[in-house]
Amino acid sequence: MLPEALNASLQEKISSAEHPRELVVDVMLELQDHYGYLSDEALEAASILLGLTPLEVEELATFYTFIYREPVGKYVIHVCDSVVCWMDGCESVQDHLCEKLGIKMGETTPDKMFTLLPVCCIGYCDRSPAILINRKVYGPLTPEKLDTILEELRKEAG
Amino acid sequence: MYPQVLFKNRKPDRIASMEEYRASGGYEALANVLKNFSYKDVRKMMLDANLLGRGGAAFPAGRKVMTVADDAPFPRYLVCNADEMEPGTFKDRVLIHADPHMLIEGMIIEGYSARAEKGIIFIRPEYESAARILDREIEKAKAAGYLGNNILDSGYAFDIVVHRSGGRYICGEVTAQLNALAGKRPNPKQPPPYATEKGLWGQPTVIQNVETLVCIPHIIRNGAEWFRNLALTETGAGTKIFCVSGKVNRPGCYELPMGIRLSDIIETHAGGMRDGSQFKACLPGGASTAFLTAEFYDIEMDFETLKKAGHRLGTGAIMVFDHKTCLVEATLNLTEFFARESCGWCTPCREGFPYLRDLLWRIEHGQGQAEYVSTIKQMCRHLWNAYCAFAPGGVAPIESLLTYFKDEVDAHIREKKCPFK
């Protein structure tokens, strides 16, 4: 169930918008923050809040890179694999992360801490190879730097 | 050192505050416009300045806003395209982080020239920090009277909101962006009607790129002629933010005169090629442009010169490849990007890019056949018939690979392996 406070704040935002539908990405992102991903329940909630059919929300949810329709870890690591990062060794970044976390690209660690996903050019080509973790950028990366980042995130999560 | 116009307040570690922007002459242009300019004066000045759209298409900014008819209905919208998803491009991010109020002032003046009352900044999710900066600085501009119902007591009303995207390359395309803003699936739409006639919510809408908008206050303050004279070439105008990346010593954003030579950008500003690297080719304006080979190393980087040479300046994102980089594999990577980011709405694009990617993959991995080359050429031509400009842009690197680096492709097929491995 959607907590009352979140429901109320979303409803308020939507009712003050001239065109409620323009908020669909914002609503999906907020619900995703609450549920950890855009679950079926979240999708249903978004459709009710916005007066759209679940299918209309679904075709948007599956379209966007940063809306997750499947469960993800606490930290979602998007590894940029476009041409500049490729030139600067994004494949070794991927390999290193897969090895360290014991998962393949597209998977989540069993402790639900990390998810690894590829992503197209994130606009940090001056810091390649670069990755995003929960939409925060890290780069230029080396295996040592990756190890430090993962350690710090594990500490942060307690 | 060339004049720094857009980057004059750029600092290594923080944004320029509104006070700093004002101290450098910021918001003077707005006050002047609201007092002394009609909306038509502003339009004419942008046209005289030869300000060309910096988002990649190089459409004259003044002419675009002139297509908003005098009797067009209200409300009208101004959309600032900060989606910037063209691979290799990161100038809009740097511009917003350098001096956000320059963008805000540019938007208000552009809004005034379109007689728009609402501005929307459409921004990609990877730029969340820039979105937060804008949210905060817009509030400051409001408190200072630069935004709101009665800007600087002129009677002109204009507000700006930040719209966060869910992240997809096609959202940078104008018509797709309008769908995205309206909460619809961001497929492109073929004009007519054009956005300036029937855009967001069916209302007249002008869409401009971040870098285009930040030029506007400077043109108002210093004049159209001054702006044109910033360029080194007769055909160019203004400065250009070049994003240099790849095999150079100092990748980054550099504000340089339009028309500066490619060799000068690489050697003087981006610190030259990395040790042991020789220049082989670059993509001059993002992933949707053709490879520019060593024979063009001294070319003057302006929209017109590149067009004459059969190339495109695009976004001015220069990705530099060295002699040790396999361009078949680079093109495979670029094609993978387009295959993944195709919105899937029209068949040629949705089916064509995966097909091209598979052929390139086979060539790169030693499974190529001689006849693949003609198949790839044919498929590229088919993609020119796709619904929007995404596909013709996406095949540009592939077509130029076959034009300029056919030997490299042939070597892969002949040796049944990648010669670079």
Image: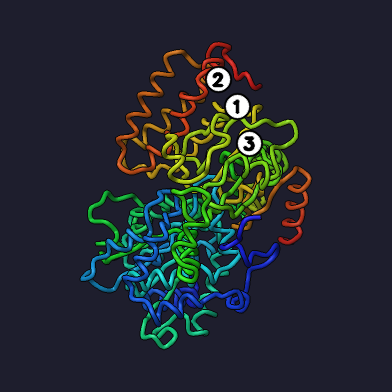
Q: Quadrant of residue A49?
A: bottom left
Q: Amino acid at mark 3?
A: Met
Q: Is residue B374 above or below residue B388?
A: above
Label 2 vs label 1: CA separation?
A: 8 Å
The answer as to whether the residues below labels 1 and 3 share one chain is no
Indicate the amino acid at tag 2.
Glu
The correct choice, above or below, for A146 with respect to B353 in the image is: below
The answer to whether mark 2 and mark 1 are in CB contact below 8 A is: yes
Name which residue lies at 34% across and 29% down: B381
Q: Amino acid at mark 1?
A: Cys
Which disc, if any, is residue B347? none
Whole-percent x, y for residue B51 in the image? 42, 58
Label 1 crowding class (10 Å Cα cut-off): few <14, some 14-19, many 20+? some
Q: Is residue A110 visible?
A: no
Q: Is residue B367 above or below residue A98?
A: above
Q: Position of residue A43 (x, y in %)?
A: 42, 60
- Check if mark 3's residue and mark 2's residue have beta carbons within 8 Å: no
Drawn side of residue B314 relative to residue B193, left or right: right
Q: Give the alpha-carbon distance from disc 1 to disc 3, as whole Å.
A: 10 Å
Looking at the image, is mark 2 or mark 1 earlier in the sequence? 1
Residue beneath disc 2: B408
- Mark 3 belongs to chain: A
Q: Mark 1 near mark 3, Cβ–Cβ under 8 Å?
A: no
Q: Quadrant of the C terminus of chain B?
A: top right
Q: Where does the image place residue B234, in percent across and percent down from the top left?
A: 46, 49
Q: Nearer the viewer, mark 3 or mark 2?
A: 2
Q: Which residue is mark 3?
A: A87
Residue with the most extreme top position: B414
Q: Which residue is mark 1?
A: B326
Say what secondary structure mark 2 lies in: helix
